[in-house]
Amino acid sequence: MQKSLHINAAKCTGCLQCEMACSYENHGLFNPAKSRIKVFDFEHEGRKVPYTCTQCAEAWCLNACPVDAIRVDAVTGAKVVNVATCVGCKVCTIACPFGTINYVADLGKVQKCDLCGGDPACAAACPTGAITYVDADWTGLDKMRAWAGKTDTATRASA
Amino acid sequence: MAWTRKILRVDLTNGTCKVEPLNMAWAQQYLGQRGLATKYFVSEVDPKVDPLSPANKMIMTTGPLTGTPASTGGRYSVVTKGALTGAIACSNSGGYFGAELKFAGWDMIIFEGRSPKPVYLWLENDKAELRDAGHLWGKTVWQTEEIIKKTHQDPQIRISSIGRAGENGVLYACIVNDLHRAAGRSGVGTVMGSKNLKAVAVRGTLGNAGIKDPKAFMAAAAAGKKVLADNAVTGQGLPTYGTQVLMNVINEMGALPTRNHRDVQFEEARKISAEAMHEKRPTDGKSQLVTNAACFGCTIACGRISKIDETHFSVVNKPEYWGASGGLEYEAAWALGAANGVGDLEALQFANMICNEDGMDPISFGATVGAAMELYELGIIKKEAIGMDAPFGSAKALCDLAMMTAKGEGFGKELGLGSARMCAKYGKPELSMSVKKQEFPAYDARGIQGMGLTYATSNRGACHLRSYTVASEVFGIPVKTDPLVTDGKADLVKAFQDATAVFDSAGICVFTSFAWTLADVQPQIAAACEGDWTLEKLNEVGERIWNMERQFNLAAGFTAKDDDLPPRLKMEPAKVGPAKGLVNGIDKMRPEYYKTRGWDEQGVPTGDTLSRLGL
C-alpha cells in the first residue's frame, strides 16, 4: 500500500513541532529554517497551514532535473533528491508548481520532503493530528466520512 | 549544552554591540532565563537605581529548553528593575521570538544605557546592528512589525517591540512579540521605551544543535508531551476553552474580584466567559472565538484567536480591527471586565486589542480603570476630569480610556500611572488593589487564601504567576487544599514559588505545571543540559533564585511592610459566596512564611539560609 502525507489545516495550532522534527531528522539539529515542511500563518484569518511536497505522480521537479538527481523511491513513492548528484542548478525549484522543493544555500543543493523513508517525522511529532500519514488512495477519507455523517436520508424520505 | 554560550551586550548610549561568553558557572547555579538573567542583572545594577534612568539595564533572555521540541519550549523573559514597581521584574512571553533568538545563536541580550535617538536592534544570526527607528517611533506594535518585515524583505523575521504606551511612559507598558504575545507585567516596556529602544528584530537560521544527549532528550520530551496530552486540563480544558475556562469556576467560588474588589462575584461573569466566546452572536451569527493557537513548541495550545463583532460600537468604520487577532485570555477578560463591572464581551475584545496593539498590560490597565471608576462613583474624580461619564459597568468608558491611555491623551495620562500612584494622587491610596504598586490579577484573596500570601510576597509585586496556589486550592493539583483556610499555605506558597522559578528559568511555560511537576521537567533538563541536574538540585536552584530576587528588593528599599495587602482585603469581608464573611489572613500567614523561608521576622534571609544556598 502506498501512503502519503495528509494535511488537515483546521487542526494546526502553529506549534512548529513538525518543523523541528523535520530539521532534526534531516539535519541533526532543531532548526525550522531548514525544515522541509513549513507552517504558514495567515494571521488576519486566524489560520495556520502546514505545507510540503505532495509527491506528484508526474513530478515536475523530477522531469526538469538535468542530471537525474531526483528519483522515485520504489517503496514509498517519494521523489527523493540524491544529494551527491544534485548540482544545485535550481531548475527543479522553477519547475515545481507548488514551491515545495527548495534551495539550501549553505549546502549548495536542493532539498524536499522524502517521507523520511516511510516514517515521516513531522506526522509523528504533530500533537493534533493535523499531519497524518495515510493510505494514499484514501487521503480524503476523513472528510468523506464527516460528510457521510451529515447525510440524513430519513428526513428527505419523510418530506 | 542547551545554552548557546553566547551573550550579546548592547551599549545603547554608544551604539555598540559586543559578544561575550556565557558564564557557565552561573548557568550551573541558575539554569537560564529568569534565574540566570537575574543573576547577571543583580551583579551589574545598583538596586537603588531609578528604573527609567540609563543606569538601569534590561535583559532579554532564553532558557536552555527554548528552541527545542520540549513542549512549550519557546519562552523568553525580560529582566529589569520594573518601572511600575521599583522591584526586580521578570516578564515572560511565548510566541516565536524566544526560539528565533536561540536559533540566531543567543542565550541573552543585555541592554545598557540610553540611545540618544530611537533605534531598533537587528539581529541576523551572529550579525548585530543598531538601526535608526525614527520612522517607527509613534507607530503601534502591529505597524512596527509590518514595517520591519518589509524593510528587510523577510516575513519570517520575529519581532519584540513597544507600542505607543511604552513610548509615552505608561508605567505598565509591555513588550509585545508576534503581534499578540507579551512580556506583560511590571512595566518592562516602559524601561525599553526609556532607552529609546523601539524593537528587537531577529532572524535565526543557525538552529539549535547543542543538546547534550539528543536521543535521551527526544524520549524525555515525548514522555512529557504524553503527560500533557493525557491530562484533563492541558489535554482538553485549555485547548478548548483557554484560560477563560476559569471565569465561571472562579466566580462560583466567590473569588472573582469585581468592581475594584468591592464584590467577589460578578453577575455578568457568564457573558464574558469562555462559553460566551464559543456562542454565536445574534448580530452576525458567528462566535467571537475563531480558533485556538499555540506558541512555539507548545502542545497545549491555550491561545485564543478571535474576531470582534464588526457592528460593535468600538469598531464601527474601523476595518483595521475586524481581522482575526489575539483574543481574550482569562486575566484580560477579568481585568477589563469584572474588575470594572463591564459585561460587554466585544468591548473587552476591543480594549484587549488596544492593549496588544500599543503594548499595555491589560491586568494593570483594567484594574486601574476599576480604581478610577470607584473614585468616580465616590465623587472624588469628576466627570470633567475624565472627560466622560465613567461609572462601573461603562463599556464606552473602558474602550475610550484604553485608546486615551495608549496614546497618552487627557485622563489617559493619569491612568498610565497605575492605580497606586493614581489613587495616592487623589488622596485614596487604600483604593489601589495592588502590592508593591502592581495590580492584583484575577483571584480574590478572600476566597482563595493562599493567593493573598502569593500576592503579598511576590518578588515582582502582586502576581498569580509566581506561585499559582489556585492549582492546589481550586483544582487539587498536585494535592487539594482548602481555599478558605490559611493553614499550610506558607509551605504551599514556598513550594510553588521555588518550583515556578525553575519552570521560568528552563525556557518552558508555567502552564505545563497543571500537569507536570518538576519530576516531569527534570529528565528533559538533565538530557539537554551539561551538568548533573537532579531533582534536588533543581529545587535548590528555585529557592536560590527566589532568595536572590528577595535580596535585590531588600537592597532596593523594600521591607516587610511591603509584603502586605490593601486594607479592603484584610477588613472588608466577602459579601457573598463560599467565602462570605471572610477576609484574607495575611497577618497570620506572613510570619509562618518567613519562618518557612528561613528568613528573620523582618523578612530578611538569615545568614544560614544564604550560605546554604550559596548566596
Image: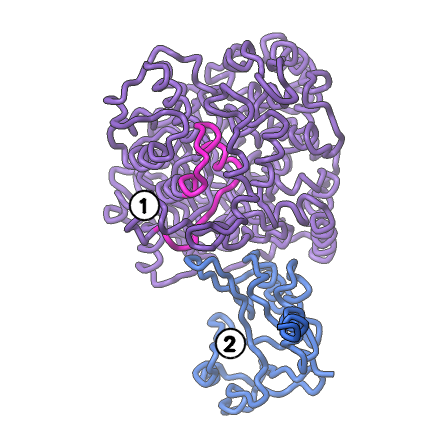
Q: Position of residue B472 (x, y in %)?
A: 70, 30
The residue tagged 1 is B140
* In this picture, residue B43 sits left or right of residue B16: right
Residue A100 numbered tag: 2
Residue B386 is covered by the magenta coloring: no
For the image, the number of numbered tags is 2
Q: Chain of mark 1?
A: B
Q: Is residue B194 visible?
A: no
Residue B333 is covered by the magenta coloring: yes
Tell me if label 2 and label 1 are in contact, CB under 8 Å: no
Query: Which region is colored magenta?
Result: B321-349
Instruction: Estimate the spatial distance between the alpha carbons at disc 2 and disc 1, rounded to whole Å.
Output: 35 Å
Q: Is residue A131 above or below residue B22?
A: below
Chain letter of the blue region: A
Q: Residue furthest top?
A: B601
The image quarter in which residue A17 lies: bottom right
Q: Residue furthest front?
A: A159
Residue situated in front as seen by the camera: B251 or A10: B251
The image quarter in which residue A77 lies: bottom right
Chain letter of the purple region: B
User: What's the residue type where badge 2 is placed?
Assistant: Thr
User: What's the residue type where badge 1 is placed?
Assistant: Thr
Q: Is residue B284 visible?
A: yes
Residue situated in front as seen by the camera: B146 or A69: B146
Q: Position of residue B35 (x, y in %)?
A: 57, 34
Binning the other alpha carbons within 10 Å of mark 2 as few (below 14), some (14 to 19) or many (20 upward) gives many
Q: Secondary structure at mark 1?
A: loop
* In this picture, residue B203 sits left or right of residue B248: left
